[in-house]
Amino acid sequence: QKPVYILAIETSCDETSAAVVKDGWEVLSNIISSQIETHRAFGGVVPEVASRKHVEVITLIVEEALAQAEITPDKLDAVAVTQGPGLVGALLVGVVAAKALALAWNKPLIGTHHIAGHIYAARLVKELEYPALALVASGGHTELVSLESEGRFKIIGRTRDDAVGEAYDKVARALGFPYPGGPHVDKLAHEAAEAAALPRVWLEPDSYDFSLSGLKSAVLNLVNQSRMKGQEPDAAAIARGFQESVVEVLVEKAVRAVRATGARQLLLCGGVAANRGLREALTARCGKEGIELIIPPAVFCTDNAAMIGAAAYTKWLHDGGTPLDMVADPGFSL
Ligand code: KG4
Ligand code: ZN
C-alpha cells in the first residue's frame, strides 16, 4: 500500500509548529517555535502578539518541516491544519497558510480539531484500541473524551470553569513563579514535607465534570491570609496540597470513566500530562486496576503539529478533505 504523507500546521495558541507525518503515526519532522519568552513578561499569552509572531515564522517553520522530512511538496497527500478551538487570530495564520499551500500545490486540505490532535498524540506512541478513553489536560482544556471508534469522539466530562493548566498557572503566579507556572508548582510539590489542607471538588456523584475555580480560590485565600499576617505563605505545602487535590480528582474520575465506557486504554494527553504527580498517580492506579495507560512523550503532549497530522490522518480516512472555503473556528466542536 502506498504511504500517506501529511504536512500538518498548528498555530492555535503560542506555538508555531509544522510537521510531516507518514501514515498517521510516523513523525518525519516536528518543528516547534515557542513564543513563551515573548509572553512571559505579560504573565500569560497576549492574543494579538501571538498572531503577529505566528505570521513572522510560519513560512520558515513549514520549510524547515519539509526539509527535515526530506520531502518535496509534490510527494505530499494533504495539508492539515488546526481549524479550532483556539485564539482566533492565531488560528487564522495557520489556516490561511494551509489554504494557500493546498491551493498552490493542488492538495486536499484537512481542517483538524485541536483536541483530536492532543488525543491522537497517543497514536504516535502506540496503536490505539477502541473504545479508548482520553483525559485531556492542558492550559485551555480539561476533558474526558470517549473514543468510541477511530476518529469518533464523545465528550463525557469537561471543566465548568478553569482548565487544569490554567489553575496551575494562576496558583503559580500567586506563589511568585513566572508563566507558565505548572512545572514550578509540580517541582515544589515534590519537595514539600507536608501538604496544606485543601478541598476536593467532586461535583454531583455521577458527574465526570471538573471544577477548579473553588480550589484555586482556596489557595489564593491561604496566600492572602498569610501575607495579611505579615508572613510569607508556605509555598511548598500549598503547592503539594493543590497538586494532591487536583491529581486525586483527575485520577478517580478518569478511572471511573474507563470503567463506565468499557475503554481498553486510557490516554493521558495535553501539556499537564508532563506533571510528575499526575503521571505517577495514574501509572500506579492503572497498574493496580489492570488498565493500559498511554502517556506520550512531553514533546507530543504540549502543542505541536505532529499530533495534528495524526488526527488529520484518521479524519481524512473517514470524512475526506475539508472545502477550501472553511474558516478558522475558535469554537470548533469535536
Ligand atoms: O497543552 P499545552 O502546551 O497548551 C495548551 O493547549 O493549553 O499546555 C500548557 C499548560 C500550561 O498551563 C502549563 O503550566 C501546563 O500545561 N503544564 C504543567 C506542567 N507542565 C506544563 N502543569 C502542571 N505540571 C507540569 N509539570
Ligand atoms: Zn493544546
Image (cartoon, rainbow, N blue to C red):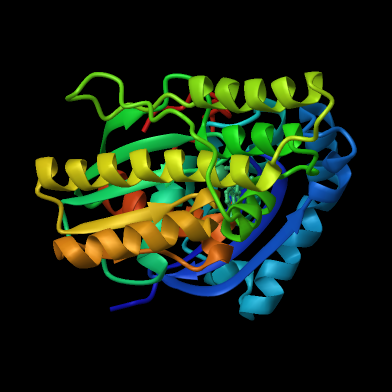
Identify the residue at horizontal 39%, vertical 71% (top origin): 125
Is 205 above or below relative to 121? above
Rendered-image quarter of ligand 2: top right
Residue closest to the eye, 293 or 83 = 293
99 left or right, relative to 80 = right
Residue closest to the eye, 308 or 324 = 308
Is 306 above or below relative to 243? below
151 left or right, relative to 220 = left
Residue closest to the eye, 20 or 104 = 20
- Quarter of the picture containing the N terminus is bottom left
How many marks the image carries: the answer is 0
Residue 24 in the image: x percent, y percent? 39, 65
Identify the residue at horizontal 44%, vertical 39% (top origin): 245
Residue 181 visible in image: yes
Residue closest to the eye, 317 or 192 = 192
Q: Quadrant of residue 248?
A: top left
Identify the residue at horizontal 74%, vertical 31% (top origin): 174
300 left or right, relative to 184 = left
Is 174 above or below relative to 204? below
- Quarter of the picture containing the C terminus is top left
Q: Quadrant of residue 246?
A: top left
250 left or right, relative to 80 = left
Is 14 above or below relative to 280? above
Residue 206 in the image: x percent, y percent? 17, 25
Residue 97 visible in image: no
Residue 220 in the image: x percent, y percent? 66, 24
Identify the residue at horizontal 22%, vertical 48% (top origin): 255
Residue 328 in the image: x percent, y percent? 58, 29
